Amino acid sequence: MNFIRSLYFHRRTWALVAGLALGFVLAFLLPPLLGVMQVLLLVFFLLLLADGLALYRSRQGVFARRTTPERLSNGDENEMQLFIENRYPFRVVLEVIDEIPHQFQRRDVLFKVPLEARSERQIRYTLRPTRRGEYDFGRVNVFCHTALSLVVRRYRFDESRTVAVYPSFLQMRQYALLAVANRLNEAGIRRIRRVGHSLEFDQVRSYVPGDDRRTVNWKASARRGDLMVNAYQDEKAQSVYCLIDKGRTMQSPFEGLTLLDYAINASLVLSNIALLKQDKAGLLTFSDTLGQVVPAERRSGHLQKLLEVLYRQKTRFLETDFERLGVAVRTRIRQRSLLLLFTNFETLHGLMRQLPYLRRLAREHLLVVIFFENTETQSLLEAPARTVEQIYLKTIAERFHYEKKRIVLELQRYGIQVILTPPQQLTANTINKYLELKARGAI
């Protein structure tokens, strides 16, 4: 049965069968052609037999294996690898079909690979998940045929595996490496000059060219007989909380991801940057009910804890209860902290209903409200309007754009920091605001 299940005929085989059938039909009209067709039929069967024997004389003529990461990064291109080995003593052509998880909705993961005798090759391709959760990979199917291309043998390799899709840890690592190398500007992070000195003194050290002369410690210089300067460092251990709205307004999609997933990815990156800057990172999620609260800490393994909590976030996208958020912040976050609130407002009326709760948060903490530009309206604003319909759409787009600007002004009127950003620039803009506030000594 295994032999029958793995046996296929190439398209060339069916074309030759059709040609032979047509030849025998013509032989009825032209009897001298019958002998030629009989010879061709015999040759065809001999070649078919030889091709089949060449493929089936080896029990395992082809080997394949898939290599996947331990976990996938949501919203990023994750690299997959297929290892293919030809164990036949002759050249073959392989068609490799990888059974990827159904969530990707792709039907193009097929690779045509010619392989010389006893050789191997690696195939690399990428997958971009857009939802957190578990993804099931299936088998690797390899269809093998020789240069004759008459018989095709199918090999199936059970590479079934379940891989979890986590918030964007690849993006987190990218920003972390740039931060360590002091190259965050390559990711769109502005260099921000610190205003004055941190309140935290570090040490007295020898002067090196480039040090600010205003930091010279004259008493220490006189004692040592060498020029000494005071060294300062960023004030440490400030609490930075990411407050993530999981309500209805965060369900809108952009490039496959919901606004909620953009907020989750940005929260993970920002938390890591805060920890690298010696601050404490915390998390609070909410919607119609209070979600999970992770107190701000800086201990070892805390980032992994945040990653696991963010991975498990689920929601029904119901109406958000900002009053419940205010109560949770008052009872759970005692120390004055930087609160980065990821939410979305489409109209000024929507903001005004929640503004009293936001003002209470801003009185006790440094609040930054982060919400999203509507990229569709932005594209309508930039496009020329030539027809009545286009003018109508552009007018509506201008109204929505004006509403967003009014929301920004209304929040700033009460001393609330604001970030209005396109989804794809959320992470960079959030880090910029955090570094700006830190440089100003606001936190």
Image (cartoon, helix red, strand yellow):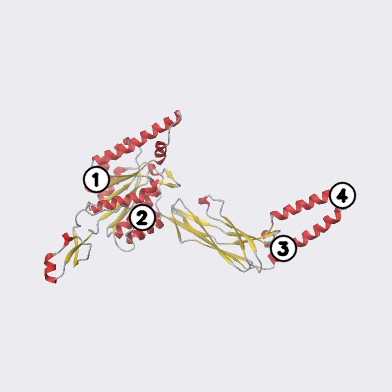
Which residue is denoted by mark 4 in the rendering? 30
Amino acid bearing label 4: Leu
Q: Residue at x 45, y 28 (%)?
A: 388
Which residue is denoted by mark 2 in the rendering? 186
The answer to whether 186 appears left or right of 239 in the picture is right
Q: Position of residue 115 (x, y in %)?
A: 61, 64
Which sits earlier in the primary sequence, circle 2 or circle 1? 2
Which sits earlier in the primary sequence, circle 3 or circle 1? 3
Asked if the residues shown at circle 4 and circle 2 are in contact, with their CB atoms under 8 angstroms apart, the answer is: no
The answer to whether 196 appears left or right of 403 in the picture is left
The answer to whether 22 appears left or right of 426 in the picture is right
Amino acid bearing label 1: Ala
Q: Position of residue 319 (x, y in %)?
A: 37, 41
| Distance CA(mark 3)–CA(mark 1) | 78 Å
Secondary-structure class at tag 2: helix
Q: Residues within 10 Å of mark 3 (few under 14, many from 20)?
A: some
Q: Residue at x 38, y 52 (%)?
A: 265
From this view, report whether residue 335 is shown above or below residue 70.
Answer: above
Which sits earlier in the primary sequence, circle 4 or circle 3? 4
Q: Which mark is residue 51?
A: 3
Asked if the residues shown at circle 3 and circle 1 are in contact, with their CB atoms under 8 angstroms apart, the answer is: no
Judge depth for marks 4 and 1 and give the one in front: 4
In this view, the residue farthest toward the right is 31
Judge depth for marks 2 and 1 and give the one in front: 2
Indicate the quadrant where residue 9 lies.
bottom right
| Distance CA(mark 4)–CA(mark 3) | 32 Å
Secondary-structure class at tag 4: loop
In this view, the residue farthest toward the bottom is 224
| Distance CA(mark 4)–CA(mark 2) | 77 Å
